[in-house]
Image (cartoon, rainbow, N blue to C red):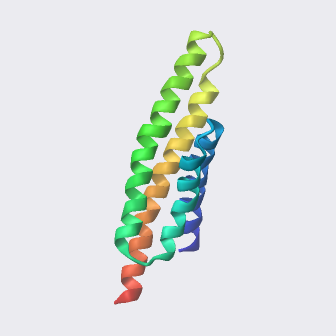
Amino acid sequence: MWWRVTIITLAYLLLGAHFLRYGQELICLAYACAPLLLFIKRAEFTRLLQIILLISAILVWGVSSYDYVQMRIAMDAPWHRLSVIMSSVTVFTFIASLCCSGVIAKRSKTNH
């Protein structure tokens, strides 16, 4: 289960770094501290983390990817590598959200 927690934490830290890049320290702090909710062994908190990851994958990485690629295309700059990197980050965030389900399932097995 430790690897699931590691993937979830890395996804949140990556999202936090994205917001820190734009000077949004409070949002960065919220994302960086969010994985601490995993220490509360209630399914509701883990499900909340999962939903936030899903929404962030679409609204943060999806929108940013589109904007960055469009900017590169408009500047007639190479954009293929950027699209691969951003797609990878988006997929990683989706995988992290799936790991939340694994954490919930593992905890429910040990509680019974």
Percent position of residue 111, x then y: 37, 88
Toward the front, the furthest residue is 26
Picture residue at 57% right of the left edge, 17% below the top: 71
**Side of 109 where 72 appears, left or right:** right
The answer to whether 23 is drawn above or below residue 38 in the figure is: above
Percent position of residue 56, x then y: 45, 45
**Side of 78 where 93 appears, left or right:** left
Q: Quadrant of residue 47?
A: bottom left
Q: Quadrant of residue 98?
A: bottom left
Compare residues 98 and 8 and report the one nearer the observer.
Answer: 8
**Side of 104 where 4 appears, left or right:** right
Picture residue at 60% right of the left edge, 17% below the top: 72
The answer to whether 76 is drawn above or below residue 26 in the figure is: above
Compare residues 81 and 67 and report the one nearer the observer.
Answer: 67
Q: Quadrant of residue 79?
A: top right
The answer to whether 108 is drawn above or below residue 72 in the figure is: below
- How many numbered discs? 0
Percent position of residue 13, x then y: 60, 53
Image quadrant occupied by the C terminus: bottom left
Toward the bottom, the furthest residue is 112
Compare residues 21 and 26 and report the one nearer the observer.
Answer: 26
Percent position of residue 67, x then y: 51, 24
Picture residue at 62% right of the left edge, 10% below the top: 75
The answer to whether 43 is drawn above or below residue 31 in the figure is: below
Picture residue at 41% right of the left edge, 80% below the top: 107
Compare residues 81 and 74 and report the one nearer the observer.
Answer: 74
